[in-house]
Amino acid sequence: MLANSGDTAWVLASAALVMLMTPGLAFFYGGMVRSKSVLNMLMLNFIALAVITILWMLFGFSLSFGNDVGGGLLGNLDWAGLTNGVGKLAGFGTDDAPWPGGDALPVLAFVMFQLMFAVITPALISGAIADRAKFWAWVVFLVLWATIVYFPVAHWVFSFDGFIGPNSSGGWIANDLKALDFAGGTAVHINAGAAALALAIVLGRRKGWPREIHRPHNVPFVLLGASLLWFGWYGFNAGSALGAGDLAGVAFTNTTIATAAAVLGWLITEQLKYGKPTTLGAASGAVAGLVAVTPACGYVDMWGALFIGLIAGAVCALAVSLKFKLGLDDSLDVVGVHLVGGLVGTLLIGFFSKVSVNTASVGSDGLFYGGGLTQLGRQAVAAGAVLLYSFVVTLIIGFLIKFTIGFRVSEEAEVVGIDEAEHKETAYDFGGIGGGGSAEGLKPAATKAATAESLERSKA
Amino acid sequence: MKLVTAIIKPFTLDDVKAALEQVGVLGMTVSEVQGYGRQKGHTEVYRGAEYSVDFVPKVKLEVLVDDALGDKVVEAVVEAARTGKIGDGKVWVTPVETVVRVRTGERGTDAL
């Protein structure tokens, strides 16, 4: 068996596209916070690229995609360190069900593609704890959460029997339950959304919330971030076909249609409820549509995508107000967009699934195509299992951090601004007395090289 | 001498400035300020959450004039800044004890 060069090229390009989603998410979130905490928000996301990559190399990929250790719960450590992957191919299938592509992918191309999913999933959670989390506590959380929550769940959902080696065995949701999740409605979005709910509980409300709500400091950033997410999402969804063929085209088309429909769904809901279509709503609608179509894009036809998008846009637009009723400061609506959007997409597969769209589908037709309730039941079990596991374990990890090293900055740091308190930086240098004018003397000036030592002590 | 202070809607500044030049005003100081009067602020909506903006952006204009010019300046500002809608602003006049031109040390009306 040889690597198919076209498929390999598409998967590598998709990996790069998905990589761009994390900085895109950083700007999507960063625009929504106040100017005194935008750097911290960007950093919570960007650091995931660094931390998760190293974990992925050391043991993350192996726990996710290594041969199953039993029960479809976790992979073994065969691929730890990744050096074993050099020169190896993935995509074998089993004797009963050969890999449909016929050709294979270099293991390392697949490793990099899946890495980017592992990076963005925990990054998504950060929106729930904006403005108030200690940076290093977040890094500890990333390590624990990826190891205990993401890697196992990715194994359940993404690891197919026979894919990583001949007759290897994978996760229980993909192979035993036969729930359909094309690109991560459960493993990525329900997973991150449930974790966001747990962390919002652990960290508590921001000072003043909800008496005073905070206006997004840069709505253009939000739209720019959403656009980068949309662009990168083509790698996420169409790349999940793991080949440059018809199925990638289907996923690409469905992704576009559902996202467009969700923008309209959100804006129409806003117009009816508040009387104005907002820019923040358009950006949020696009993300809600992308989330909802993620699990479905390889299993439904274009009508399915249209309805999934419309429903997701409208439902998420209503869901983001729930946090005020619950009194829960999920600051940037990770629950309202990712958990709710992920549930909408995962469950609607039970209605819109069409086996003829994807011949490799292990599922059955949905309720609307004569398949009865079989697939809907599987979808609900998969969604419920991931939601429950992620929520409970995240709650435990969160409280563990809170009661040991502490998860939240001091009240003073929160008021002054977390950028200054946690990073000794300020995002913007304009406005205020002397800003841009001739009164240079009033501006803070660089007076010395930054060292931890005082300038006096470094003289010798 | 008088100090004429006006709080006006930002977009009327160009008209006010032109009107003041017409009546012979040679200099002025403007600053961007925020505040509210009877119109109060406005509300914005972000993902369904209402955000009330209490303070509205305004321009504050300060002009030092000779006693004789005071009324004409007030009239010029009021005329140019009026839109007839709520939130047009206010103009007030205060007496000024002395004025010094920093460059030459001239005092009083010579310094205007």
Image (cartoon, coloured by chain):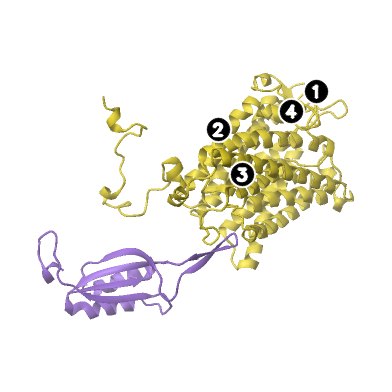
Circle 4 residue? A75
- Badge 1 element: loop
Q: Quadrant of the C terminus of chain A?
A: top left
Q: Nearer the viewer, residue A16 or B56?
A: B56
Mark toward the viewer: 1 or 2: 2
Give the structural element (helix, strand or loop) at label 4: loop
Mark positioned earlier in the residue sequence (1 or 2): 2
Measured from the top left, where is residue B83 in percent x and y? 40, 77
In the picture, the disc for residue A50 is 2
- Chain displayed in yellow: A
Q: Earlier along the polypeptide chain: callout 1 or callout 4?
A: 4
> As drawn, is A449 to the left or to the right of A17?
left
- Residue type at mark 1 is Pro
Q: Which mark is nearer the camera, 2 or 4?
A: 4
Q: Colour of chain B?
A: purple
- Which residue lies under the disc numbered 1? A166
- In the structure shown, which secondary structural element does the residue marked by tag 3 occupy? helix
Residue A253, how many percent across, how many down? 71, 46
Name the residue at 61% across, 39% down.
A400
A310 relative to A191, above or below: below
Q: CA–CA distance between discs 1 and 3?
A: 34 Å
Q: Quadrant of residue A66?
A: top right
* Marks 2 & 4 on one chain: yes
- Residue B48 vertical placement versus A8 (above, below): below
**Circle 3: residue type:** Leu
Distance (Cα) linking label 3 and label 4: 24 Å
Determine contact: label 2, label 4, CB under 8 Å.
Answer: no
**Label 1 to label 4: alpha-carbon separation:** 15 Å
**What is the x, y in percent for residue A129?**
57, 48
- Pair 1/3: label in front: 3
Q: Which of disc 4 and disc 2 is earlier in sequence?
A: 2
